[in-house]
Image (cartoon, rainbow, N blue to C red):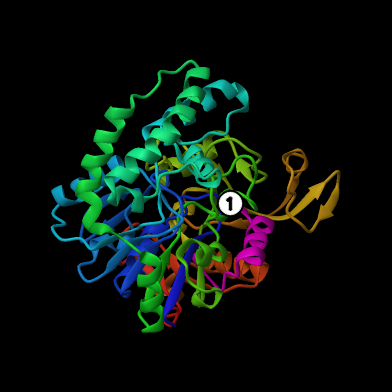
Amino acid sequence: MSTLAIEGMQWGDEGKGKITDYYAAKADIVVRSQGGNNAGHSIQHNGVRYALRLLPSGILQKNVVNILADGTVINPASLLEEIDNIHKKGVEEIHLLISTRATVLMPYHIALDKAREEALGDAKIGTTKNGIGPAYEDRSARLSLRFGDLLDKEYLRKRLHAILPLKNKEIVAYGGEAFEEETLYKELCEEADKLAPMITDTTSYLQKAYKEGKKILFEGAQGAMLCLTYGTFPYVTSSSPLATAIPSNTGLPLSAVNEVLGIMKAYTTRVGEGPFPSEIFGEEAQTIRDKGHEYGTVTHRPRRIGWLDIPQLKYVISISGVKHIAIMLLDVLSVVDEIKILTKYTIDGKEIDYMPASLWELEKVKGEFLTLPSWKEDISSVRKYEDLPANCRNYISTIEKLLGVSIDLISVSPEAEATIIRNHNIF
């Protein structure tokens, strides 16, 4: 197949970076189609650990073209800092294209994000405070700057002059300090001069590449349950991480997404507020958190821990067309004696077969659990499925039966080679 979409199946932080890095080595083009620098992911590449936010995972591959496509919101200062950081780690040459249609995330977006979260108090969303939400709002309100605007300094000045007074009024209303137009304009011009060689019509570029049969990898950011429409609203991100959103965020047709690979942890985590039916508390949660290094790549916040949630995963499969699954951090579960799997949702004692759309209803959900024995063996050096402990294989086969989708990749340690590939024909 010429294209593969990688999608996080939970609330993000599923370990997509490792799998994306694996497939990036097989790709001609790696595309990031939505989100911004709130989407941190870690990759171990040639023995070096990289913490990427905006840059696609293919940036570490010499012969891969990387694209920040139409649906992204990009902080120019953050992007330039990230590029500088990977140069310092020895990555000399990068191939990066930025869409003329991508949204410029501005300093006032960050100021508004922080001010709103503070004003919401206990009702806060739990954002990364990187300005993502306000940037997407301006996009929908037609008040955003786009990267194509950075290529014409006079047009850029006119747009900023029209937009900034509105943003300043809102910031001042929250008790913040207004931004000075000339200062912002000069900063933008400096950033534009550095980024201009990378800014192009990526829609046209991708359309031609697709017609030529190039191998295109669509890199997922965040997770399906953070989708603005289908996630646990309002505790979601401001775009759609679903594979189904890729065409509208890249300018490619619906038929362009051939295969969808869902990435899930062997357990569940999430960051921020919101209902979490399979959540684990206390010492057991902390043990899993420490073994799995469950702290945010961007924020360093400790992640909430839960058991695997089958109704949630089946819901994601149904709305996004996941055809294959990679299970990550399987080795972490060796630290517990028993593993639970949430198999059914109930409300007031009655099973439900849908994902509640409203927060008030989701808060009522109780889980029914299946308990399986864990394994105490260290599986980090295992490279063949049949060499996994019997209890480990039983856990995997149980998940496959419950979901009705095959688990084709199994990660047993963070290292790139510590992956059991059961299907070599996905991409």
Displayed quadrant of residue 378: bottom left
Tell me if 43 is positioned left or right of 279 in this view: left
Q: Nearer the viewer, residue 195 or 310?
A: 195
Q: Amino acid at mark 1?
A: Cys
Tell me if 364 is positioned left or right of 140 in this view: right
Picture coordinates of residue 221 (x, y %)?
A: 45, 54
* Callout count: 1
Q: Quadrant of the N terminus?
A: bottom left
Q: Is residue 301 in view from this perspective? A: no
Q: Is residue 52 in view from this perspective? A: yes
Image height of 56 relative to 143, above or below: below
Image height of 242 relative to 208, above or below: above
Picture coordinates of residue 380 (x, y %)?
A: 36, 61
Instruction: Identify which residue is drawn at 41% across, 56% down.
Output: 101
Instruction: Identify which residue is drawn at 26% across, 51% down.
Output: 50
Residue designated by label 1: 227
Picture coordinates of residue 265 (x, y %)?
A: 50, 56
Residue 325 highlighted magenta (yes or no): yes
What range of the chain is rendered magenta?
Answer: 308-326
Instruction: Identify which residue is drawn at 59% across, 51% down.
Output: 225
Q: Nearer the viewer, residue 351 or 286?
A: 351
Q: Nearer the viewer, residue 30 or 166?
A: 166
Residue 205 highlighted magenta (yes or no): no
Kind of element beneath mark 1: loop
Picture coordinates of residue 153 (x, y %)?
A: 27, 44
